[in-house]
Amino acid sequence: MENVGLFGGLIYMAIIVLMIVSMWKIFEKAGKPGWAALIPIYNTIVMIEIVGKPVWWILLLIIPGVNIVFGIWLLNLLAKSFGKDVGFTLGLIFLGLIFYPILGLGDAKYQGPAGQ
């Protein structure tokens, strides 16, 4: 029974490392420092800069209810910034564990804020 807990913990750590590496690569592709993916709140500010929105959007992302709408909008703009469509946005929302690595570790190229 203890092995299940250990195995689960290792899987959890592997998922965390995968997501950190994916965000690191996304930031680097957009010309931002990869280490910013490690710092809470600052990583969201960097993401807002990547998609070309003003930094005060961080305030909208901490208001309950409003944050859901603007979080989805932010993911849509992130997908557009890498030349992806609405289907990819839905993937980021519902299957982020798969789609963030595709964006960061795949061949997607940063095309400017929201794809310009």
Image (tube, rainbow, N blue to C red):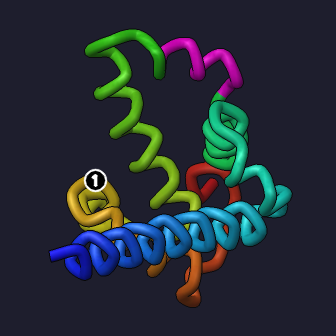
Q: Which residues are magenta?
A: 54-60
Q: Quadrant of residue 53?
A: top right
Q: Is residue 103 above or below residue 80?
A: below
| Left or right: residue 12 compared with residue 8 | right
**Type of the residue with mark 1:** Ile
Residue topped by disc 1: 93
| Left or right: residue 109 compared with residue 62 | right
| Left or right: residue 2 compared with residue 46 | left
Q: Is residue 43 above or below residue 92?
A: above
Residue 52 visible here: no
Residue 17 visible here: yes
Q: Is residue 96 magenta-colored?
A: no
Pinpoint residue 72: horizontal percent, then vertical percent: 34, 39
Q: Quadrant of the N terminus?
A: bottom left
Pinpoint residue 41: horizontal percent, then vertical percent: 64, 31
Seen from the viewer's position, the closer of residues 10 and 50 is 10
Pinpoint residue 91: horizontal percent, then vertical percent: 27, 65
Q: Residue at x 64, y 78 (%)?
A: 109
